[in-house]
Image: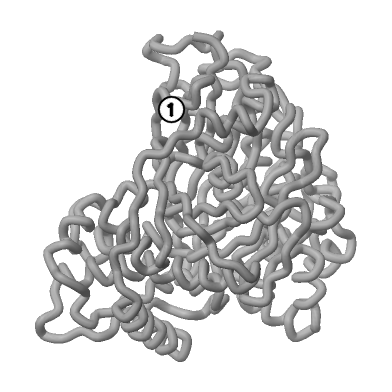
Amino acid sequence: MSDLVLAIDQGTTGSTIALMDAEGRLLTSVNHEFPQIFPKPGWVEHDPESIWESVEKGLAEILADGTYAVADVSTIGITNQRETAVLWDAETGKAVHNAIVWQCRRTTDVCEQLKAEGHEALIKARSGLVLDPYFSATKFKWLLDNAAGAKTLLDQGRLRAGTIDSYLIWRLSAGQAHKTDVSNASRTSLMALDSLSWDDELLSIFGVPKAILPEICPSSGRFAVTRGVAGLPDGIPISGVAGDQQSALFGQACFSVGDAKCTFGTGSFILMNAGDVPVASDSGLLSTVAWQLEGQSAVYALEGGAFVCGAAVQWLRDQLGIIESAADVEALAQTVEDAGGVEFVPALAGLGAPYWAPEARGTLTGLTRGSGRGEIARATLDAMALQNADILNAMEKDIGSSMQSLKVDGGASANNFLMQLQADYLARPITRPEVIETTVAGACFLAGLGEGVWSSPDEVTNVWRSDRSFEVAMDDAARAARFESWQSAVAKTLLS
């Protein structure tokens, strides 16, 4: 079997390595988790070496049993957790500090200071992003100021900075390439949306030297080739790179303006194809780069994200012990007719779009003596769907038209009950693809286009296949009542 595409999906809690064939079929995958590090409340870190070890382990395993031959791997695609920032030594490849994860809120005070200095409007106009600790720029600055040895390495010209894609490209190529793609660069607050280049004024505001940052490249095209990677021969091209949510948009074949997807992962992220011109948001959403194919103009997207989605179910499992596995939440939620007035606003890492309240904390309200595990589980699934509906309503307001349908993906999209809730609360049909690992699919499609496995996005569309649709089953009055209760709970959270 020839023309296999290997994907590295480096996520927030683990790294998945997968193989796809030219028909768009996901053949096999392996996943390895790595530790989450919480040094202080609201702080989240990853050990970059643990990330690399999880990737190396998966790469060694994916072809080990001989079912698929490494000689048939034509290219590698990378998709990654976005905004997570890492600094490393160019000579050793070793990070100088744990990576600062996208969920981390440690730079909230820095963002407030920049707002007080009057920088917010320019940052949003130039980068398309709100001024929030979510994005990479203030994380890079924190690392420059606090990581042991960073200043010395900077003075010696040995310091490198990047998001996780850049770090992986560096390690996969044995330090031969320091590159990123336009979608990841657009999440740093340091790239100008119109020029697709590092912006000198933004770099000055955030105090990040351009010299340590990677070269910005199109999302599809050759970035580097492998060198010295255990389990892989030297010379395999790395030809597709995109941040996980943009990769999912591409993997869902959302190639027309107005096409949209929602990925249910650790957080939930909704992106809409906005075409070749950025769309400014008046509703707390983000304008970002979706992707750029080699030799073509960039495609932009409108985005809204909720920081905690699937992570809320993990919280029920790990902190409360309400369920034994994440899959148990669906059955438990269906043991009750509704949440019985219980509302869970999962602001466990602040609130993202459209509220942007980094200091907000999760709230569980409406509890009575009759409230139990079932009501809390149902309130959690309700919250996952309701916060997405908030984002989609804001998105429709920005674009001035109604969305006709929504494609869904990610691990939690396998939860049929949750998908039905999403259709009901959104009042739009939901379509789930056969391959719900669309971040993987997007990385494969971008890499395959870069090396000729597929000749055009039209060919990619032909291999995308639907699994199931969920039609709206809730009436308008019930939906309005449910939203009234939810909005009241969100208001209490924002005041707390």
Colouring chosen for the image of the structure:
one colour
Residue drawn 55% across and 54% down? Answer: 260
Residue drawn 57% across and 56% down? Answer: 271
Q: How many marks?
A: 1
Tell me which corner region of the image, top left, top right, bottom left or bottom right, holds residue 62.
top left
Residue drawn 80% across and 59% down? Answer: 208
Which residue is nearer to you in this view: 441 or 100?
A: 441
Image position, residue 240 (x, y; %): 65, 32
Q: Name the outermost residue toward the right.
A: 200
Q: Is 290 situated above or below 486?
A: above
In this picture, residue 250 sits left or right of residue 27 = right
Residue drawn 19% across and 53% down? Answer: 328
In this picture, residue 342 sits left or right of residue 172 = left
The C terminus: image quadrant: bottom left
Mark 1 crowd level (few <14, some 14–19, many ≥20, 10 Å Cα) = many
Residue that mark 1 sits on: 26
Image position, residue 370 (x, y; %): 10, 81
Residue type, numbered disc 1: Leu
